[in-house]
Amino acid sequence: MMDMAWLGLVIGSFVSIGAYTVLIGDNPISKVTEHLYTGILGGYILAMNWDFIMRNAITKIQGGQSIYIISLIVSLMLVTRLKPEWLWISRYPVALTVGIGMGLAIRASVLSDFLAQVQATLLPINNINNIVMIIGSITAITYFLFTAKYEGPYRYINQTGRLFLLAAFGVTYGQTASFRFELVIGRLVDMLKPEVAMYTYGFLVVVAVLLFYGYSTKKIPWYKGR
Amino acid sequence: MSSRLVKISLPIWLTSIFGVLMIIEFFFPMPAEITATNTTLRSFVLIVSAAALILGTVILTIAHVRRISTRKPEWYYSIIYLIAFATTAVLGLSSVRETNFLWIYNNMTSPIGAALYSLTAFYITSAAYRVFRARNWNAAVLLITGFIVLMMLIPVGAAIFPPVVPIGEWIRSFPSSAGFRGMIIGTSLGTVGLGVRIYTGRQKEHLGIREERKEVS
Amino acid sequence: MALIIAGRMLALVALLIIVAAILFYMQRAFSGKIPSLRRLSAVDVIAEILGRCVEMGKPAWYLFGSVDMTTPSILAPTVAAFQTLAYTARMAARLGAKFFVPVNQGLAYTMANDIVQEAYRAEGKPEAFDPLGTVMYLPSGADRMYIINHMWEEQVAGAFFLGSWYHEAVIYTENAARVGALMLGGTDTTHNIPFLVAICDYSVIGEELYALGAYVSQDPTQSSSLAGQDIGKYFAIILILIGAILATAGASIIWLFKM
Amino acid sequence: MSIVKKILDLDQRVIYLILFVLLAYPILNPVILPMAIQDYSKQAFNFADSIPDGSVVLIEGGNSAATHPQCGPGLTANIYHLLTKNCKLVFFSIGAEQAFWTNREIQDAINKLPAGVPAENGVNWVHLGYISGGESGVAALAANIRSAISKDYYGTLIDDLPLMKDINDAKAFSAVFWWGGSEGSIPYGVRQLVGPYNLPMSGSCTTNEVPNYSPYISSGQMKGIFGGVRGSAEYEYLLRVPGPALGQAMATNFGGLFWLVLVVVGNVLYFIQRGRGEK
């Protein structure tokens, strides 16, 4: 019997190479991987959500919580869209989702975004760090003012706020970059494990030869990057 | 008139009622019946969302079948989609804990997903080369802070230039936090504003409602 | 039993102040008093991007990022982006730009589908809307490969990245930039806004994403509500200043937040 | 078109290819660049190094499949370090999966040991395996090992293990290493071993958990901590025994340096181009 764990590593390595070819741009190998991946995920999502509905609606209805029949009816309202005159029926499930979702978003954002951030800025003005913090927060808030005209002193406040925002963006950019290298490394470590490395190299060569042939004979269009 | 009621007014009213239910529950102690109703409503959202995903998958599959039957360009790729879809769906519908179904997930979906996630490293690098040029003050701020923080975070960075760590930490703790603080406060106000516009029925595009707006008098 | 759940008094007060301010300005708009707002450059950019696509005969894409209508913090920016979608789709239909909207979540897909279909109908071009192709559902995750591949294949000339963006932000924007698309990007997620700001030609940040919909709505009551949001900002600034001055003097107002 | 412009408009696929090579190479052949050691790691290493030769040490192995790639190499280095100091090691885990990975890490360390270092099961080290009961399980183990468990990981009776002859409770140990992975179990050790028995303790957790435990370090309840893959790499670096974590850290280095170099080159060329007045 074949070792399924080992086979999994090899297959995983192959499909990863397929996914990485997308870096070159659109090509047949990435297209094959794309359709394979979409198909698997489609089947997975279908099965998982079917299972979810069975467990959370059907089982509950069978158990006597008949109110869950409403959830099924609302779900079926989505399907009516297939007939254009009935399109409006699907507004009800949307009303349910957006109504509840916005309510939850508002209540969470007032307490844990608006007030929590204000609270964290209530610092004594006695050292440079706190002064930077307070000035930065206030100018960044004023950057978003919609009623202020871009003229007079507001111009400078707006510019300062923008600089603070950009500093924040730069920090996040650098921070994300360092973390994302670890993702590639994590994948490469799996692909280059001694027991699968030979297969990874082999497949890499096959892919390289196929692509080289395709590009050199112009069977695959080469897209010029800007 | 009644058609306007069920097609337009009622969905908007329902949106507001559901929303207000969620908000008052957060601030005021509520009788158990209302909290129970709210919990049920939230579980309805999950069920509807699951149903919508099934619907979406079905429509996507129909699109692929049609691509094959009408022999659209590159129709042959759709065959791969259908085979992969059918295999996973049949295995998964029999049971989501089926061994082969989980094997496919663990050994094909996860690696591709991880590989695609890690593509960000490549794009971050090539984007940095293209856009991180000190064309003006704004670009320079972005460039310098990004440069210092990345240098601080890689192990060799501090060995090359030790002061980079305190500088980077300072930027990360103060100017950067301050900038994001302003952005987050703004965003929370935006959320409240959006909520008010939706609940008062002024904004209804998400319901697919289009009305030629009459000028307000 | 307490009247208000402990620790949420100030949040309730803040919410009431903000909502009251927004409603006040919306009410004033009915009587014709419209506050003057600063111009958001992104508003004109939408027409510019679509015009360029028409000129070049290439498609314009409208992407939402990671959509999950069951997570409130993702739902809110997505709903905000839907309003801009309604405007953009309508303009695309009017100008005759090829328009494409991939969505990676079921409910959002049905919503986007309705919006775009309605927009094409409003412009009297329902035949230009392809029920299977204009708005497309792609399983979350697989959409990344589809979008990269097709961006190159179709050579998109314009792209909108509005909504709740996660790690896809840099993947899509960098590809679109390399293909040569003109881009407008914006999100409220702090982790990925840097990429949209750095890579896109035009960007909206945080609250501007929410405001963009109100700007393009051409409904004065909606744009007036933005003036109400500004009251919320002044409220935050005053609270910070008072709190900081009191803290310097040795008094703390943290108890206010614990009520 | 000048050469400067050509380099500035470098095709992105060249960048991707170089980055791939730079990231893959150190994984295959660790190239050691100098690295700055974080304070917590240095403290944890010095603590491990200061343990007298021949002491009996208690180690909790809490790495799972998810955390083994990051923190496993660190525990391996820790075992290697202590065995070369001729310490006697007693392992246990508070999860069944973790017990398996701990065993794997022990074997990894033994395979690496230079010839002549004794590493006999039952004499130099003992793996007690999975102790159930979470924090109360740890408390029971500390109070009386034989009441908490009767057989080790391999099914041998505790009384048949020579090393365990004189060891019956936490007082027999001179130090604790708590490799908590992502279990969040470090407070168990602090509350059940450091507090009641006054044992010095150090350990490891995933990077994102480090801030949660820094109060323990400033209060002296922990002697230091290794965070995530970087902590593991630093242990390997300080011990001068390159391993998988160091390879990964070096790959991150290469990626990061490439990024930094690209940005510098891009800007220098950009200013050259601007100075020449080219468009």
Image: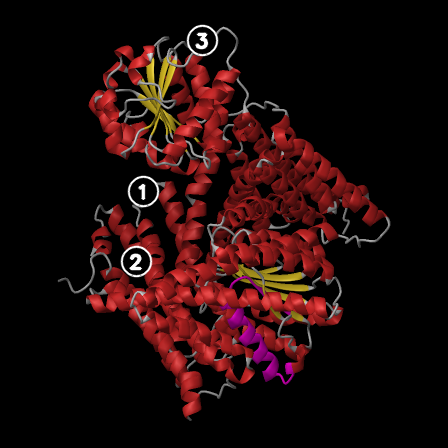
Q: Is residue D115 magenta?
A: no
The residue closer to the viewer here, C231 or B66, is: B66
Q: What subunit carries mark 3?
A: D
Does the rendering let one see residue A190?
yes
Q: Helix, strand, or loop for circle 1?
A: loop
Image quadrant where one finds the N terminus of chain B: bottom left
Regarding mark 2 in the picture, which secondary structure is present there? helix
Q: Nearer the viewer, residue C36 or C87?
A: C87
Residue D225's spot in the image, x, y percent? 38, 27
| Cα separation between marks 3 and 1 | 60 Å
Circle 3 packing at 10 Å, graded few (<14), some (14-19), many (20+), is some
Which residue in the protein does label 2 denote?
Answer: C239
Given contact means CB atoms under 8 Å apart, are the residues at marks 2 and 3 in contact? Answer: no
Residue D47: image location, x then y, percent: 37, 18
Q: Outermost residue, left direction?
A: C1
Residue most extreme to the top: D116
Number of numbered callouts drawn:
3
| Residue that numbered label 3 is attached to | D118
3 or 1: mark nearer the eye: 3
Which mark is drawn over residue A126? 1
Q: Which residues are magenta?
A: C100-126
Is residue A116 shown above or below C56?
Answer: above
Q: Amino acid at mark 3?
A: Pro
Percent position (x, y) of residue A183? 55, 40
Q: Which of these two is toward me, C105 or D249? A: C105
**Residue at disc 3, secondary structure:** loop
